[in-house]
Amino acid sequence: MTNPKLPPILINKAGSVYYVYTYKNVWDRELKRSKRGESKKIGTILGGQKDGKIRFDEAFLQEHPEFRNYQVERKGKDYVFTQISEEGITLEQARNIKKLHAGATWALDQIVADSPVGEFLKECFPRNKDYKKILSLAYFLILNQNNNVSFYETFAETTRLPYPRPLSPSAITRLFQRIELRDAQRYFLLMRSYLQEDEDNKIILALDSTSISSYSTRLTHIEYGKNKDDDALPQLNVLFL
């Protein structure tokens, strides 16, 4: 596809801003040669430098709508054209777009926003944005049937989470090592204080799960699974509410 043709262009600086002007040559009868006529502002160079992307004025785009489909960047004496898609982004930007699953985590975001969980995590685990990492791991454990955190990195690469970068198993290990008992206790004290503020209007549920190893060959609910004690026995999975 052929790029649209730019009109004659001038770059003038006013203060710290570089403006883009166009002009038309007019014939000087006395000098018998053409000279530059009146100029007209058509845009601004972004970034405060003489080189950079041009943001065209709306009046210019109405006269030359073909430029709406291009990003124009000044580089020295050259002007580089990059085609823009219907979504308003360049092809290079489109290649770098990362599509993430976000429906389930958006729902969890709303639950967190309606509670003090996020605020209390931030207060107790502020270093290295650990509160966002802990919340992201909690999302993973809630949304995945397999709670093996070694799968978290793959999950994080395709899912929108409070902490945007995937965590390797070693990074998760370091995160857990940074969680000190006093910080965890402080978090639960804050939660307890919040829940006790208005006990009459709150329903408090405690949830816990465990696995009980068994040598039995007769219990119908005994089966092999992810054994918390890492022994080679079948187990009974128990969930307490």
Image (cartoon, helix red, strand yellow):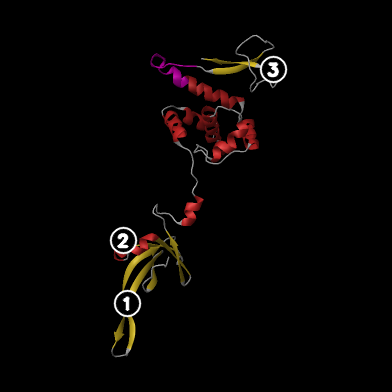
- Residue 58 is tagged as 2
User: Which one is in front, 124 or 51?
Assistant: 51
Q: Is residue 136 magenta?
A: no
Q: Quadrant of residue 194?
A: top left
Q: Position of residue 159 (x, y in %)?
A: 51, 38
5 in relation to 164, above or below: below
Horizontal side of 234 relative to 16 (left or right) equals: right
Q: Cβ–Cβ below 8 Å for labels 2 and 3?
A: no
Label 2 secondary element: helix
The answer to whether the residues at label 1 and label 3 have Cβ atoms under 8 Å apart is no
Range shown magenta: 193-205
Label 1's element?
A: strand
Spatial separation of the CA atoms under disc 2 and disc 3: 73 Å
Q: Which residue is mark 1?
A: 24
**Badge 2 or badge 1: first in the primary sequence:** 1
Left or right: 4 as drawn, with respect to 98: left
Q: Amino acid at mark 1?
A: Lys
Q: Residue furthest right?
A: 232
Which amino acid, by three-letter code, is at mark 2? Glu
Image coords of residue 34 (percent x, y): 33, 85
**Which residue is under mark 3?**
233
Quarter of the image for the N terminus: give it: bottom left
- Residue at the spot 30% in from the left edge and 86% down from the top edge: 28
Helix, strand or loop status at disc 3? loop
Q: Which numbered disc, 1 or 3, marks the residue that appears first in the sequence?
A: 1
Position of residue 40 measured from the top left corner of the image (x, y, whole percent): 31, 70
**Residue at position x 57%, y 40% in the image:** 166
Looking at the image, is 22 positioned above or below residue 113? below
